[in-house]
Structure formats: C-alpha cells, structure tokens
Amino acid sequence: MTENFDRAPGAGRARTKPRSPGLADVGDGDATSVFNQREPLRQPLTSPPLTENNPNNSDTIGGESRRPSKPHQFIHNHSTPASKVKSVDSLVNSSILSANAPEFYPASFSPYEESVSEDGSDGYYTEMTLAELVEEFLSYLNSSPGSFETDIEHMVNMLSSWVTTEETLQELVELIYTQSTAIPNFSYTGARLCNFLSHNLVLSPASGNFRQLLLKRCRTEYEQRDVAVRGDLETQKKFHAYVLFLGELYLRLEVKSAKGPPSRAEILLIALRELMNTLFSNPVDGNLICAVKLLKLTGSVLEDVWKEKGKSDMDQLVQRIENIVLDAQCSRDVKQMLLRLVELRSSNWGRVHAAAASDATPDNDPNYFMNEPTFYTADGTPFTAADPEYSEKYQDILDREDDCFPEDCEENGNESHPKVSKTF
C-alpha cells in the first residue's frame, strides 16, 4: 500500500498505442520512450533564434514530420520570398508619400483651422448674423416673458454692438416689427422691447432714430389698411396682428419731453381711431373680433384722452357698434361679444375710482357697501346696509337683544351685569 503512495505522479498508468502510422512499427519500449521524451523549453524572447543546425531543433519524430514547436521556426518556415521583399523595397524607394505630408481630409469635410468662406469668415463655425441674433432673442423672450426685466439690458448691449450703421438699424426695425406681428401673443412684449430700444440705442443717423424708423414702418402698413381689411383671410390675419401691435405700441411707447413727463405718441392715437373706422366699414366676423380686442385693450385710455380734449369719439364708436349689432350680418357669437363690450364701457371699462370718505355715497362709489357687515333676521335671511328695509330689520335685531339681555339682569344674585352695547 505504501508503494502506491510513493510512486511518481502518472506512474503505472496504462497508455494505449498511438494510432499514428509512423509509430505503429515501434515496439512497446520504444513507444514509451518516445512519449516520455520532453520537448526543450521555449527559448527566451531575448535569445537569438534557433538555427537549422541546432540538434534540439528537430522537425521529425520517428521519421515523421511534425509542426514546428517554436514560434521562430514557424516564422522562418513561412517567411516572404526574397523576390517579394525586393519588390516591396523598390516600391518604398520610389514612393512619393511622405510622413511630413499634411493631414488628409475627405473632399466633403472642411476642417475648422483651414476652412475659410468667401467673405473671409470661418467656414465651420460661421459667425451669427443680426437676423439670427434677433430671432434668438425674441424666441427667448416669447418663451420666458418673466425674464424681460433681468435680461433686457444685456440683450440691448449686444444689439448696440451690432447696430452701428443706418442699414443695420433699419434691418433691426424690420426684424422686430416682423416678429412682433408674426409671433402669436408677442405684441405686448414686442412693444415693451421697442420702448426700451427707443431710449437705449444711441445710434441716430440722418434718416431717424429707432423710434422714428419704427413709426415710419407702421405708417407703411397703415396706408394699406383699406385694401387689407377687404383682402383674403391671410391678408386680414396679418392686418389684425398689425392693429393689435399698434394698440400695444400706443400704450407702451413713451415719448420723452424736455419740458415735462413722458407722453404717448399722438400720431398713434389718430391712427387707432382711423383703424377702428376701417374695421367697422367691413363688418365681417374677423374684423369685428379684432375691433373688440383693440377696444378692450385700449378703450379706457382712449376715452380718457378724448374726454380731456372734449371729444366724443368713444360715444360715436359705441353708437356704431350698436348699429352693427342690429343691422350687420355677423354671427350670433360676435354680436354677443359686441354687446358685452358695450356693457364693459357702461361700467367705466371695469375701473373703480375711489371716492373720498366724506364724498362717498351709494351713488358715486360702487364699493360703498363692500365693508359693511352682514346681518341675519330671525328666520336666517341675510341682509346688509344696502337692503331697502335695512332700518326695520336692524331694529328688530336690537329689540331681540334687549329681550335676551335685560338691563336689570344679575349673575349669582348679587353681581349686576353691564348693559349690552348696541354699537357695531
């Protein structure tokens, strides 16, 4: 049993004869010696390659060929013929390629460092144009109108660096006007932007400053009002956007004066009056809806200005609206809009003027009874000081209090309870 533990690993194991025909004629002892023959260790990578005369470099075992056992042998046996090596060397010597040649780029690719456009600007990262800059600004203000106050100065400073000639100033006016009338619901922000630019753009060429050029552009559209109001649907839509932008511009654009506080542009007041006459001259639904929007926007301001000048223009407009409701062939919904507009004007455009405390009466102050308390009758019916029977109902409450709290009421038989106050 001890012998089994002392034998070398693998000793005593039976081996089958190899099926290779080269080893079939070898005896058992010879076969065992062949299988026990161990190949020499792999040469170090730093050692010279084995030569053909090396006795350890045998390619046969028992007269049969075998694959090379060394990487060097495999490379040596499969090396390129000398003729091919010479042809490669001749190609290398005759080649015009150079390691110092410039970097190759496809024909459709223009590298940033070397690409230059015809106007001398960079061809990969092209410089932004004024139109792209204005469009980016207005798109940002349209999506984030609350950032107007915080970002407008930075925007105007950038525009000032761009607008240095009369041509660029006219281009800026055209871009802002176009975007303010094309982007839905942007007329308010566009008018605020125009007012800020009119006071902060320092460029003032001979043709006029920003405000003057803007009013000239608006006048160009104003002169086409009679044609636009009777045009096709798309033409009327653009005209209506212009009208609403002009209304916002009248409210926001301030004209500074050296003698007094800023005032509104008088020319816009005249233009708005004529534009409303134009809209009512062709009383189709689209024109009437635009007129209603314009009057809701500017009606209170226009009426105050006309009253200060002793004019009755608003009364004339309201009379014309009432005639349209009776005679025009507009839709029922539009007629309802016109009637609600008349009601809005009769309520002073929804405004409430606070009267002095000494002059406040139920007739001149709609909020006269706003802070009055609410009382309840014996059956739970609420009433206030505005109730016509207020005095009688309030007296009934006082009488009930007298019944509940008599003057001679005592608590615990010895402490007199004070008289209840009837003052609220």
Image (spheres, grey):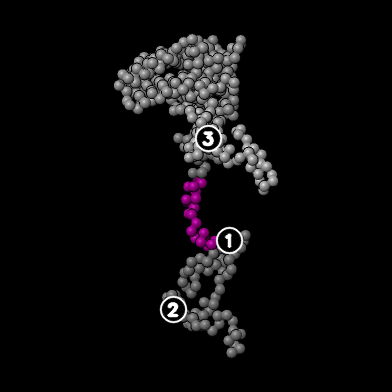
Q: Which residue is mark 1?
A: 49
Tell me which label, 2 or 3, sits earlier in the chain: 2
Quick one: quadrant of the N terminus?
bottom right
Q: Which residue is mark 2?
A: 24
User: What crowding class fits label 2: few (fewer than 14 Cα within 10 Å), some (14-19), or many (20 or more)?
Assistant: few
Q: Which residues are magenta?
A: 71-90
Number of numbered tags placed on the structure image: 3
Please state which amino acid type lies under the numbered disc 3.
Asp
Element assignment for label 1? loop
Type of secondary structure dominating the magenta stretch: helix
Q: Are marks 2 and 3 in contact (CB under 8 Å)?
A: no
Residue 215 pos. (x, y %): 49, 14
The x, y position of residue 344, in whole percent, is 44, 23
Q: CA distance from mark 3 to mark 1?
A: 129 Å
Of the residues tagged 3 and 1, which is closer to the observer? 3
Q: Which residue is at the front of the view, 247 or 7?
A: 247
Residue type at numbered disc 2: Ala
| Residue 227 vertical placement versus 122 (above, below) | above
Q: Nearer the viewer, residue 196 or 164?
A: 196
Question: Residue 174 at x, y = what percent?
Answer: 47, 19
